[in-house]
Image (cartoon, rainbow, N blue to C red):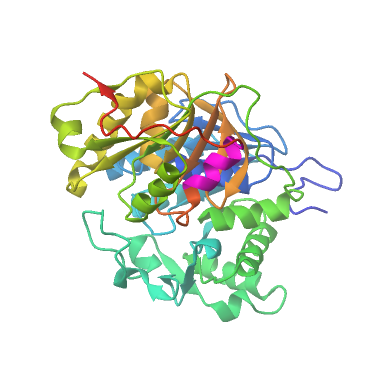
């Protein structure tokens, strides 16, 4: 019998997943493999997922005050169908309101199984410490855009939530041993924080959690969502494909990651039009990107800014591209950027189609437009080029670079 089934031959349980930003919601939706949708919430009373389907709510809580974020999580869990399997997506770098949201998520359930590794991105957990390609998170510069230092462990990031480590030896132990280790932590009133370095480790964690039965919730990255998808659904053989209608392609790069510059350079070499917006003009002299656009247009923020201004900058960026974006297919990097742009063009519902590369998820809007979302910290130097070539297999006609490209 499937671990997701209600009984022999019974229907698969619906999955309700909660994410704190849009790129994470899309990553989760495609990882779960089941037919599903992404709602841009919070939604007061969303229609529940059907058996065998998944519903992913983007709570848009990453940058909100902690109490507000916790309330959004609490409201969403209270609205879950009684038979739903609950999954809480968290950032693999432990950013956002993790402590507040985890505490709200853990209320009124038997326990939460926690696994924050993301092996495809080189992010593992050993001895309860997140490591980026072997280096402890707090020793890297991955939190350079945050206003506080990186936590030294997953337990520290969880704040006052009572937790207990589950070492790699237990994760890779004999069949049944991991399930018993999780059960022992719950019996102590603690939520297990599992080490993991490979997808096989995450598969074992997800399987043991499901074997514990109803009332157990999962909290982790897209890696754990992928493990859940592998257990609950058939292999995903779909290939993301461009739509039938060829629209202008607008790429909005809102991430502060240093790698973004090189990713954009690849597009410019291919002939994309470049619109560069400085932080100063976005904050003090905002303008509007004027349609019609070139076949491929990439918009990027340049210049340094305080992390405290990041939310204002992204809002101004979304306002700048809103008019032009309404008639385009979109590629949006960074969860906050993706959400603000889609809010600006009034998109509230997405259907995931597939993944171009890890984390770069293609979805469709109700009117048939393509939207690719990708976390800002993901992707190699050719990430944006790969996305564009998946959506536009024909070569891009060369367009001279325009340093402004905006109308007064």
Q: Is the magenta stretch mostly helix, strand or loop?
A: helix
Front residue of this view, candidates 352 and 399? 399
Numbered range of the magenta stretch = 384-393
In this view, 209 is above or below 349? below
Q: Where is residue 129 in the image (x, y as percent from the top left)?
A: 41, 72
Q: How many marks?
A: 0
Front residue of this view, candidates 281 and 375? 281
Residue drawn at point x = 45 percent, y = 72 percent: 133
Tell whether 333 sits left or right of 15.
left
Residue 390 is inside the magenta segment: yes
In this view, 20 is above or below 400? below
Which quadrant would residue 387 be assigned to in this image? Answer: top right
Residue drawn at point x = 71 percent, y = 55 percent: 231
Residue 398 is inside the magenta segment: no
Q: Position of residue 214 (x, y in %)?
A: 65, 51
Q: Position of residue 174 (x, y in %)?
A: 70, 79
Tell whether 232 sits left or right of 168.
right
Front residue of this view, candidates 298 and 152? 298
For the question of whether residue 213 can be seen, the reply is: yes
Q: Where is residue 249 in the image (x, y as percent from the top left)?
A: 48, 30
Query: Which quadrant is the N terminus positioned in?
Result: bottom right
Tell whether 20 sits left or right of 308.
right
In this view, 236 is above or below 151? above
Front residue of this view, candidates 17 and 404? 404
- Which residue, as the protein is rendered here, is positioned at the far right? 9
In this view, 231 is above or below 310? below
For the question of whether residue 60 can be seen, the reply is: no
Residue drawn at point x = 29 percent, y = 32 percent: 317
Query: Which quadrant is the C terminus positioned in?
Result: top left
């Amino acid at each position: 019998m499937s671990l997701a089934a209600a009984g022999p031959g019974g229907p698969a349980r619906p999955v309700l997943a909660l994410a704190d930003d849009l790129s994470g919601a899309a990553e989760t939706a495609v990882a779960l493999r089941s037919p599903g949708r992404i709602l841009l919430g919070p939604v007061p009373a969303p229609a529940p997922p059907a058996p065998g389907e998944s519903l992913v709510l983007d709570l848009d809580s990453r940058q909100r005050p902690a109490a507000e974020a916790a309330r959004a999580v609490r409201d969403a869990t209270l609205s879950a169908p009684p038979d739903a399997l609950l999954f809480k997506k968290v950032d693999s770098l432990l950013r956002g309101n993790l402590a507040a949201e985890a505490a709200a998520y853990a209320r009124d359930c038997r326990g939460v199984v926690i696994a924050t590794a993301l092996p495809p991105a080189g992010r593992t957990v050993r001895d309860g410490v997140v490591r980026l390609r072997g280096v402890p998170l707090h020793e890297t510069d991955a939190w350079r855009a945050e206003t506080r230092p990186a936590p030294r462990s997953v337990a520290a990031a969880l704040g006052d939530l009572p937790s207990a480590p589950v070492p790699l030896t237990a994760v890779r132990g004999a069949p049944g041993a991991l399930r018993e280790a999780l059960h022992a932590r719950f019996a102590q009133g603690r939520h297990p924080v599992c080490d993991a370095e490979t997808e096989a480790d995450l598969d074992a964690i997800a399987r043991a959690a499901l074997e514990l039965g109803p009332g157990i919730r999962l909290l982790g990255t897209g890696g754990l969502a992928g493990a859940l998808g592998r257990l609950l659904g058939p292999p995903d053989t779909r290939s993301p494909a461009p739509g039938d209608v060829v629209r202008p392609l607008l790429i909005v790069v809102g991430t502060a990651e240093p790698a973004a510059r090189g990713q954009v350079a690849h597009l410019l070499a291919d002939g994309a039009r470049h619109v560069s917006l400085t932080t100063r003009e976005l904050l003090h002299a905002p303008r509007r990107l004027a349609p019609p656009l070139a076949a491929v247009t990439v918009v990027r923020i340049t210049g340094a800014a305080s992390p405290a201004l990041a939310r204002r900058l992204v809002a101004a960026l979304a306002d700048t591209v809103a008019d032009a974006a309404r008639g385009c297919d979109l590629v949006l990097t960074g969860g906050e950027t993706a959400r603000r742009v889609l809010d600006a063009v009034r998109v509230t519902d997405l259907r995931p189609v597939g993944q171009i590369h890890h984390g770069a998820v293609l979805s469709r809007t109700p009117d048939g437009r393509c939207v690719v979302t990708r976390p800002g910290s993901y992707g190699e130097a050719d990430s944006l080029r790969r996305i564009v070539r998946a959506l536009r297999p024909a070569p891009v006609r060369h367009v001279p670079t325009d340093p402004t490209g905006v109308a007064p």
